Amino acid sequence: MIIIQICVGSSCHLKGSEDIIELLKQAIAAHHLENEVTLAGSFCAGRCNRVGVTVTVDDEVYTGVTKEGFAEFFKNAVLPRTGK
């Protein structure tokens, strides 16, 4: 099981964490990964960035995730862990 935690602390919230959550839900459904991925919110991950949202995939922290860069993030950070 892959655990993805999206920071919903005030800084990431202002930088679009709700949008990233929605994009993750859509991407997980589109790739039929509902049984392989667990989404969770987290409060401040302590890795604030000037741009974008902090997302943790398993134990790896990614900073600066944006709507514009989401497809690349998902392709490089999530899909390889699924074996797809």
Image (cartoon, rainbow, N blue to C red):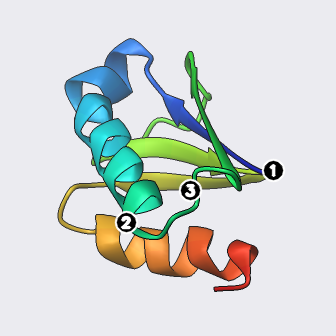
Residue annotated with mark 3:
62
Q: Residue at x 64, y 46 (%)?
A: 56
Location of residue 82 (image quadrant): bottom right
Give percent across and percent down for residue 34. Answer: 58, 51
Q: Nearer the viewer, residue 13 or 40?
A: 40
Q: Is residue 80 placed above or below 40 in the rendered structure?
A: below
Give percent across and percent down for residue 52. Answer: 30, 47
Q: Residue at x 46, y 57 (%)?
A: 28
Mark found first going from the N terminus, 2 or 1: 2
- Calculate the distance from the C-alpha at mark 1 to the C-alpha at mark 3: 10 Å
> Which amino acid does the dot numbered 2 rest on?
Ala
> Secondary structure under badge 1?
loop
Give percent across and percent down for residue 68. Answer: 18, 65
> Which amino acid does the dot numbered 3 rest on?
Tyr
Is residue 50 in view? no
Q: Residue at x 27, y 55 (%)?
A: 66
